[in-house]
Amino acid sequence: MSSSQPPQFVLDVRRPTGAGEILRDRMLTVANAIHASGLADRLVTGHEGLVISGADRLRVLRTVRRAHSDLVAMAEPASHAWHATPSAPFYLRPDKQPSLLPPRTLEDELRDQRLAGASVVILPAGYVSVGDVETARAIVEAANAIPETDVAVPLYLDEHWLMADHVGFLKGLIEASVHPVLLSFGSTTNPLGSKKRLQTYLDIASAGAICWRTDLAGLAGVARGAMGAAIGATPSLRRITPPERNGKARRPDDQTPYVLIPGHLHYMKTKAMRDEIYVSTAAPQCGCAACGDLRIDRFAAEDAPSAARHNHECTAQLARAVLRAKPGERMAVWRKICQDAVVAHQSTAAAIGRDWKPPLDIQVFAEL
């Protein structure tokens, strides 16, 4: 190999044991049943993985496991759709079974995930309202009582936990957990929609949590010291919607998929790209493995699975750039990527003759 060639991304080929070792420095993709099988074929087993969400998650997980024996794959319970309490930290859905049979137990839930082939089983923790420290503590304490090592414990928290007053408590809770903590925040829109919230999120995640059901903030979290990240393939999987509420779409009349624009770190619907950005200038071609140099604004409403594969390929490239770096150098790598994205917006704005600002999170990350 010539000395001018970049160093190769060498992965540890040992088979990890225990949830913490399996999930450390791993970039997971959260997908529903429609997208999961197609994405599974594209994941790199050494540092990627798949989280399957939705009512069909266990059936799809079994299918994925048969085709990909070495892939890190998990099935996420829908427990975040219910409120947790100190006396009932976990939600156990009632089975369709005769009432004379015993009720469903936590052991039943974890057994079903294991039988379906889950690499790590996810506790069915409920949603935690802001300031409910008793419930948050009860979730971690109940999880700590589980002796098996293949367990991860979600903290599905209301977005208003993202305040300075709660940082110390949440970091202490993450550090007190004997199992990896999946850190996720609930909102009807974007829970990380301000500079202060983004900074608070990274501070909390740096205690060693896994940035769960998030967007590119998950990569920033890993750069800052988080254990790993799970990035949603679609907008609804990049956050938790609070119980008894519905998510709000920014463009409900536009059914085209959100697509990550290469080099810009900007998720945008393809119709909006055509109507607002690439009107008199051709949209850029994408050279990722899913696109093959086709234009980025080509995806129609029925192309959502293809768009999800594109988003994954772009995110995977970014993840590799972060993970190649030593832990102490990752934030500098991520900051430079975001600074380049800011410059890309400026260049595109000059080409189209109108102002076009980068997303708020990318501006914040570029200044970290």
Image (spheres, grey):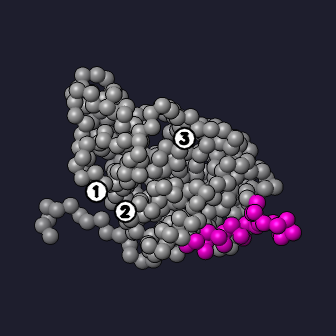
- Residue indicated by mark 1: 289
Q: Are marks 2 and 3 in contact (CB under 8 Å)?
A: no
Q: Is residue 164 visible?
A: no
Amino acid at the residue labelled 2: Arg
Secondary structure beneath dot 3 equals helix
Q: From the image, state whether disc 2 or disc 3 is nearer to you.
A: 2
Amino acid at the residue labelled 3: Thr
Residue at image position (53%, 67%) is 61
Residue at image position (56%, 34%) is 248
Closest to the observer, 301 or 120: 301
Residue 42 circle label = 2
Q: Dividing the image into 4 quarters, which one contains the C terminus? A: top left
Earlier residue among tags 1 and 2: 2
Q: Residue 31 vs residue 327: left or right?
A: right
Q: Quadrant of residue 47?
A: bottom left
Residue at image position (57%, 61%) is 57
Closest to the observer, 149 or 99: 99
Q: Residue 164 vs residue 266: left or right?
A: right
Q: Residue furthest top?
A: 354
Secondary structure beneath dot 1 equals loop
Q: Dividing the image into 4 quarters, which one contains the N terminus? A: bottom left
Q: Are marks 1 and 2 in contact (CB under 8 Å)?
A: yes
Residue 107 forms part of the magenta stretch: yes
Q: Which residues are magenta?
A: 94-117
- Mark 2–mark 3 Cα distance, whole angstroms, equals 33 Å
Q: Residue furthest right?
A: 100
Earlier residue among tags 1 and 3: 3
Q: Are marks 1 and 3 in contact (CB under 8 Å)?
A: no
- Residue indicated by mark 3: 200
Earlier residue among tags 2 and 3: 2
Amino acid at the residue labelled 1: Ala
